[in-house]
Image: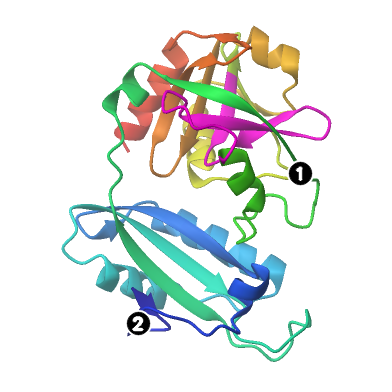
Amino acid sequence: MRINGETADHISALDRGLLYGDGLFETLSIVEGEPLHWSRHMARLTQGCQRLKITAPDSDYLLAEVRACCAGKTRAVAKIIVTRGQGGRGYNPANTTPTHIVQCFPWPDFPAKNSDQGVVVHVCELRLAAQPLLAGLKHLNRLESVLARAEWTDDTITEGLLRDSQGHYIEGTMSNLFIIKSGQLFTDPLQQCGVAGIMRDIVMTLAKPLGIRCFLRTIDEQQLKDADELFICNSLINIWPIRCVIDRGEYPVGPLTRQLQQAIRAM
């Protein structure tokens, strides 16, 4: 682990990331010691820092930290955390210096069948709260995802789908959600809540040259049930088709999902 440019394993108990979740994070795939989609991750982190008014770390410095932390790793997961830094009691964010943390974890042993055959997902009871100022950000306040993930213990369930207070399907606990209907892609615009994932952005970018139209629209219960195909995505799993939404329906692993999977592999 690297903290503020040095090998270390602890931060101050006064760090605002610990006290208030005051910060952001990125989760990256590492292949042969190098992070995938670095420019996209860095752009999102920088934009998030700007929105939270935290001084963003230098890209070259942070890349060197990731490389140092993940050196010699064939496959791994890197996590970058940027907090506002140490502060006293109270919410006033003034007079702080950001804390930078880089961690390296073993690559998860994802079953190949998740990508090939699709996954089973649960519809969570927890509803995402609306907060436009934080919508899209990968901030450190992840209690909604923690509580949602605690809703199931069945190992046959891979992910949980999250809705907002109006019943619109927003995302998964660790992923973004796309539905396919009549050859077109749909995903929530994330204007009120949710995380704008890197793989979500890549999917939308790849869809255009493939001739697949993509729309940012809310997804209600009926649209989910009527979908031709469903899939979830993030930077580690790429795309996993959804073959069953419990108590909602079953779905084929369809041709557009396969086409997008192949396009990502070819990047």
**Residue depicted at x 51% and y 9%:** 251
Q: Quadrant of the N terminus?
A: bottom left
Q: Residue at x 74, y 12 (%)?
A: 222
Say what amino acid the circle numbered 1 marks.
Gln
Instruction: Locate the C terminus by quadrant.
Output: top left
Is residue 78 shown left or right of residue 68? right
Q: Is residue 11 left or right of residue 103?
A: right
Q: Position of residue 220 (x, y in %)?
A: 75, 21
Which residue ends up furthest to the front in the rendered image?
A: 153
Does the magenta portion include 201?
no
> Residue drawn 49% across and 32% down?
153
Give the x, y percent position of residue 117: 35, 16
Give the residue at x 63% y 12%. 248
The mark found on residue 217 in the picture is none
Q: Quadrant of residue 194?
A: top right
Label 2 vs label 1, nearer the camera: 2
Q: Nearer the viewer, residue 94 or 216?
A: 94
**Residue 58 can be seen in this image:** no
What residue would you read off at disc 1?
191
From the viewer's perspective, is residue 46 above or below residue 196? below
- Amino acid type at circle 2 is Ala
* Above or below: residue 264 compared with residue 198: above
* Neighbour tally class for label 2: few under 14, some 14-19, many 20 plus, Cα within 10 Å: few
The x and y percentages for residue 66 are 33, 68
- Please report contact status of discs 2 and 1: CB closer than 8 Å, yes or no: no
Secondary structure beneath label 1: loop
Answer yes or no: is residue 42 visible: yes
Q: Is residue 58 left or right of residue 215?
A: left
Residue at mark 2:
8
Q: Marks 2 and 1, Cα distance to the nearest angstrom?
A: 37 Å
Magenta-tinted stretch? 150-179
State which tag comes first along the sequence, 2 or 1.
2
